[in-house]
Amino acid sequence: MPKRINHIFKENISFAKLLEAHNKCKKNKRFKKQVIEFEMKLESNLIQIGKELLNDTYTFSEYFEFTIYEPKERKIKTLNYRDRVVQTWYVENFLKPYFKSNFINDSYACIEGKGTHKAVEETQIYLQKADRTYKEVWVLKCDIKKFFLI
């Protein structure tokens, strides 16, 4: 039977936790226009976000959409900075603490201490082990067309 987590949402809405989320979001982006504008009114922005979350009135704004052409044409949708702070706060306080322990050991995406480089290292170890164990080793490299298209 799945565990149920009650009464933790409002307990985790605090200025300190929202500030922590902001600091995590601004890494490598602190000179971007949206980050600078958000920091110019940092305290009032975080207090306003906190109030909206407490009152269940917070709404995400429209995605900003743009196209990149390397290595191939892709449409990218991104949140504005204010929404990114809320998203980071949510992930750090709810998703990571309660779901990370349920992931298999070979989950690498967006997990601290893991990531792409660690996944490559582990894949090389698995391939070397397979090469020692089996006569033939096959690798399937593929891309699923429009996998993330909604």
Image: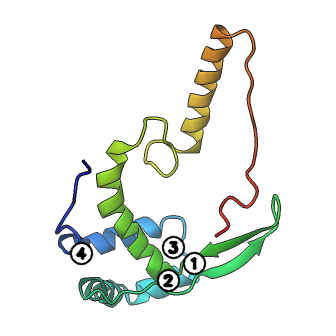
Query: Quadrant of the rendered structure where residue 117 is?
Result: top right
Badge 2, how many Cα within 10 Å: few under 14, some, many 20+?
some
| Circle number at residue 13 | 4
Q: Earlier in the sequence, mark 2 or mark 4?
A: 4
* In the depicted structure, whether residue 120 falls above or below residue 133: below
| C-beta proximity under 8 Å, tags 3 and 1 | yes
Q: Earlier in the sequence, mark 3 or mark 2?
A: 3
Name the amino acid, label 2: Ile
| Gap between marks 3 and 1 measured at Cα | 6 Å
Name the amino acid, label 3: Arg
* In-front residue for pair 37/13: 13
- Residue 10 percent across, percent down from the top left: 20, 75
**Quadrant placement of the C terminus:** bottom right
Badge 3, how many Cα within 10 Å: few under 14, some, many 20+?
few
Residue at x-position 75% and y-position 49%: 143
Badge 1, how many Cα within 10 Å: few under 14, some, many 20+?
few
Q: Secondary structure at mark 4?
A: loop
| Circle number at residue 36 | 2
Q: Secondary structure at mark 2?
A: helix
- The residue to which callout 1 is attached is 32
- Residue 43 percent across, percent down from the top left: 31, 86
Q: Earlier in the sequence, mark 4 or mark 1?
A: 4
